[in-house]
Image: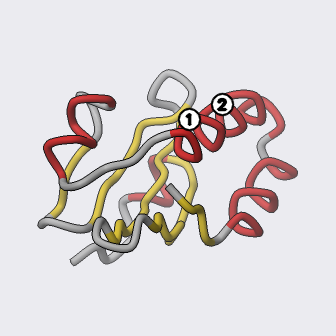
Amino acid sequence: MELIGKEILDAFKQKHSDARSHVDAWEAEIRELTWKGPHDLKAHFPKASLIGNKQVVFNIYGNNYRLWVKVAYNSGVVFVKNVGTHKEYEKWEIK
């Protein structure tokens, strides 16, 4: 999958260095995968939360952080929307 929004992840990693290796590992996995639909995503990340058909929230670093993406399955692109703490996550308007 192609990853769009790396600058969001980079800013997050600078602010939360404890999660750097976990975000780096997630990024590396995403780039190696190909998802045809939500079922493929859930097969690889069973704990990911699907919101509709295209939005996904991942737990990062032992569920300390949340990573919100939008997935364009047809074009093979993952768009990073936001990443943050649980407190920040509670304020996100994911639709």
Left/right of residue 87 with respect to residue 75 in the rendered view: right
Please provide percent x and percent y for residue 62. 50, 21
Q: Mark 2 and 1 residues: CB-CB less than 8 Å, in contact?
A: yes
> On the image, which quarter does residue 10 sit in?
bottom right
> On the image, which quarter does residue 21 sit in?
top right
In front of the other: 16 or 80? 80
Q: For mark 2, what is the residue?
A: 25
Q: For mark 1, what is the residue?
A: 29
Please provide percent x and percent y for residue 61. 57, 27
Q: SS of the residue at dot 1?
A: helix
In front of the other: 58 or 37? 37
Amino acid of disc 1: Glu
Report the mark closest to the observer, 2 or 1: 1
In front of the other: 80 or 75? 75
Q: SS of the residue at dot 2?
A: helix
How many numbered discs?
2
Q: Is residue 39 above or below residue 78?
A: above
Q: Residue at x 31, y 77 (%)?
A: 93
Left/right of residue 50 with respect to residue 94 in the rendered view: left
Compute the Cα span from label 2 to label 1.
Answer: 6 Å
Amino acid of disc 2: Ala
The quarter of the picture where the C terminus appears is bottom left
Disc 2: CA contacts within 10 A as few (<14), some (14-19) or many (>=20): few
The disc placed on residue 6 is none
Q: Is residue 72 above or below residue 87?
A: below
Please provide percent x and percent y for residue 73. 30, 65
Q: Residue at x 39, y 47 (%)?
A: 34
Please provide percent x and percent y for residue 17. 83, 37
Q: Residue at x 52, y 44 (%)?
A: 30
Left/right of residue 39 with respect to residue 33 in the rendered view: left
Give the residue furthest to the top.
Answer: 62
Q: Residue at x 71, y 64 (%)?
A: 6
